[in-house]
Image (cartoon, rainbow, N blue to C red):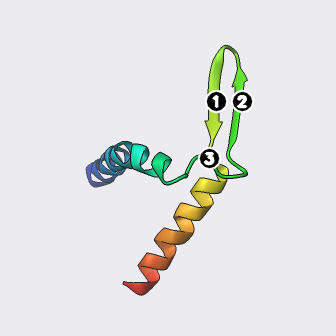
Amino acid sequence: MIRWMIVIFLALLLISWFTPLLHRLGFGKLPGDVRFRAFGRDWFLPITTTIVLSMLASLIAQVI
């Protein structure tokens, strides 16, 4: 259980570090990424970005 918590923590840490780089590369602004305002907050659902990044990770995993 502790091992999974550490993995999740490290994954979130890496994501937060690479978010500015991904925004500069255009991720998060793809067609299919949904932004809307509800209940006084801005909401962001990166559907297309998630699919593209998971396909990229799958491709890297197949090569390795």
Marks 2 and 3: which is nearer the front? 3
Disc 2 secondary structure class: strand
Residue 49 point in image, percent of width and height: 59, 54
x%, y% of residue 15?
39, 48
Q: Position of residue 60 (x, y in %)?
A: 43, 77
Question: Residue pushed farthest top?
Answer: 40
Residue wearing tag 2: 36
User: Mark 3 or mark 1, which has the lower sequence index?
Assistant: 3
Asked if 54 appears above or below 6 in the picture, the reply is below
First reached walking from the N terminus: tag 2 or tag 3: 3
The C terminus, quarter of image: bottom left
On the image, numbered disc 3 is attached to which residue? 29
Picture layout, residue 51 above or below residue 46 = below
Q: CA distance from mark 2 to mark 3?
A: 13 Å
Crowding at label 1, few (<14), some or many (≥20) Cα neighbours within 10 Å? few
Q: Which residue is mark 1?
A: 43
Q: Name which residue lies at 40% across and 49% down.
A: 21
For the image, the number of numbered tags is: 3
Kind of residue sitting beneath label 1 = Trp
Image location of residue 50, percent across then percent down: 58, 55
Amino acid on which disc 2 is placed: Phe
Residue 54 occupies which quadrant of the picture?
bottom right
Q: Is residue 11 left or right of residue 50?
A: left
The local secondary structure at tag 1 comes to: strand
Residue at position x 37%, y 49% in the image: 18
